[in-house]
Image (tube, rainbow, N blue to C red):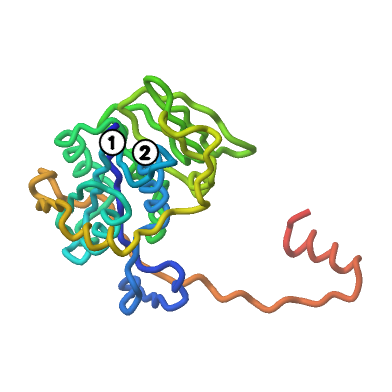
Amino acid sequence: MKILVVLKRVADPDNANKIKISEKGVDTSGLEWKLNPFDEYALETALRLTEDGKAPKVRLGEVVAVTLGPKEAETQLRSALATGADRAVRIDATDDALDGRVVAQALAKVVADEAPDLVLMGKQAVDGDSNQVGQRLAEHLDWPMATFAATVVEEEGGLLVGREVDGGVLSLRLKLPALITVDLRVVSPTSVYSLKTERAHKYNDGVRFAPLPAIMKAKKKPLEVKSLGEVVSDTTLTSKYVRFAAPPERGAGVKVKDVAELVDKLANEAKVI
């Protein structure tokens, strides 16, 4: 199986308290860049689908990592290569030159060139949280799609996907080629299986980390660079941010003397009952 994994670098969400917001924009200067966490889960899913869980160093398919970003984003691509991806593609672009439409069209061209059996990506990026590129791309490709995947199991001729929905998990069978966006639970020990991995096998919880020898080898793995103009004919942005504002500070609480006063305030001031 050949899998294309879409990755994005984002400002470290664990240090979100250091972000500064003005009407001109969000200032993330000084924050460390890292892979979007949901995209890391997509990469782990791709690796599990292209291996025997008992021999994870042997890739039984091909995993191609792709990102849209500046030269500095190659650091994250090399990290993906060290983790187990075979090749990488970077489309040279800055964040201010991209929106969901442009990204989806660019990825559609990459998919046409690479002809993968499966496209995997995170359900959303933690910086914009727009959750639209996967759906847009599936529409461009006219491929079946499953969003918010919690489990992915390879079957003869396709995949059995468990989608997280309100109240539980919805199971879907997808014929390849297909597109899947993944959620947090997909990196649980028993969430993803290839045909080669025995169902009794349990992975470590979470994503894998690259050992030092793999990090060194990743420096020699192929990394192709394309310009945005090569993959998108019209780079006009169709969506933009009008202004930015921090959420209002939370007001102080109010003490009440008894239950009767509490009920009165809930009914007449808060209007919740």
Q: Classify mark 1: helix, strand or loop.
A: loop
Report the disc number at residue 61.
Answer: 1
Report the disc number at residue 51.
Answer: 2
Write the residue at 36% across / 48% down: 43
* Relative to 48, residue 212 above or below: below
Q: Tag 1: residue type?
A: Gly
The residue most toward the top is 157
- How many numbered discs, if any? 2
* Relative to 26, residue 131 above or below: above
Badge 2: few (under 14), some or many (20 or more) residues near its Cα, within 10 Å?
Answer: many
Write the residue at 47% across / 41% down: 148
- Is the Cβ of the residue at disc 1 closer than 8 Å to that at disc 2? yes
- Residue 57 at x, y percent in the picture: 33, 47
In the rendered structure, the answer to whether residue 245 lies left or right of residue 215 reads right
Q: Is residue 218 visible?
A: yes
- Residue 77 at x, y percent in the picture: 25, 57
Q: Tag 2: residue type?
A: Glu
Q: CA distance from mark 1 to mark 2?
A: 7 Å
Q: Classify mark 2: helix, strand or loop.
A: loop
